[in-house]
Image (cartoon, helix red, strand yellow):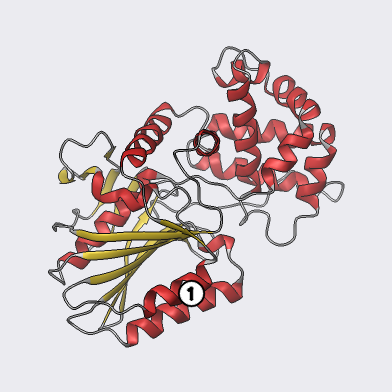
Amino acid sequence: MEGVLTIFLSPFETAAGAEVAVLARQAIVLRSLDQPFVAALLEAGQRQLHRAPRTAALIRNWPGDAAAAGLAMRFNGALHALARADEDGRLATLLRHDHDDFDGAVGAVMAERDEFIAAWMRDPPQTNEVARAGAIVAALMVVASMVDMPFTLLELGSSAGLNLNLAHYRYDLGGQEAGSAGSPVLVAPAWRGAAAPVGSVRIAAARGVDLRPLDVSDAAARERLSSFAWTDDPFRAALLTQAIALAQAHPPAIDRDDLTRWLPRQLATPQPAGLCRVVFHSMVLQYLNAQQRAAITDHIHRAGAGADQARPLAWISFEWTECRSEVRLMLTCWPDGVRRHLATCHPYGEWIHWRPA
């Protein structure tokens, strides 16, 4: 089936070092996503972990699912940050493809900067993938075809809030142009499957929440965001840079809070007639435990039970399936409460496989 990622057990998982599997498994996934360079970085990191005892211990003793917590991507982000800080170093020149000594460059920096890497990995990834806005906007178009009213957006896990600015981006969705004409940020995922939806998306307000929101006016925050971009994907890096610049001109509204406390308060706020409230999130649920995920679902369904034609509610989810075989774009709308599987998507928004209505 197109778009499905099969995650195999790693051949590197051994009794001698369970932490090795975390990097090796993600390398397998990245190769299936056509990201061989980053996969090679992780594979080198797996082979060189013995040179970074703090990092190895952090991974080995991680409480919970290390894969769901994105530890491999945290490791990759730390390497990218170190390379960006030392542009003439061996790791930076590797990232520029000036040589191919992965083990030499990665192993040396792991030995020298073990403490930095371990400290960096304690905080969750801040990828804030702008390309995912294409899927969210496509889902909003579906909602717009059912309710002719502006949207008020509530985003869970906003990071720097770049996707709260989706109204300021322009889009090419399977040849259909949408969004803000003339915007420097163009989101143009490869479109597969059924024809793209058609609809006018009007955003009346947008607000998000994050435990550790990043302020794009802060240089350190911008550097952290940039470090989580793929090291060998200039298009992705350029899109992020453009979205950050736009966010500096149009600062998104983000609250620093626990989303399980924030969401019920937002949903309890009176909703004016003629506005459609939308809760959306992308690649957030994997960082929550089962109790938190259940609470989010319960809060949304309770709010949905109170929705009516004048005050509808929509829930847009861009998340891995439970078995992590594919990323699905899901939509539930109230008052009817119908749940729809709209599309299967690339995890970082590079392509969308749209399902027939």
Q: Quadrant of residue 254?
A: bottom left
Residue 49, position in %: x, y?
A: 79, 36
Callout 1 secondary element:
helix
**Which kind of residue does numbered mark 1 sit on?**
Ile
Residue 305, position in %: x, y?
A: 33, 87
Residue 70, position in %: x, y?
A: 61, 50
> Does 119 sit above or below residue 271?
above
> Does 148 sit above or below residue 264?
above
Q: Residue at x 71, y 62 (%)?
A: 64
Residue 317 shows in the view: no
Residue 229, position in %: x, y?
A: 49, 36
Q: Quadrant of residue 290?
A: bottom right
Q: Quadrant of the N terminus?
A: bottom left
Q: Residue at x 61, y 45 (%)?
A: 26
Question: Which of 254 and 57 lies nearest the eye of the viewer?
Answer: 254
Residue 325 shows in the view: yes
> Does 280 sit above or below residue 170?
below
Q: Which residue is mark 1?
A: 296
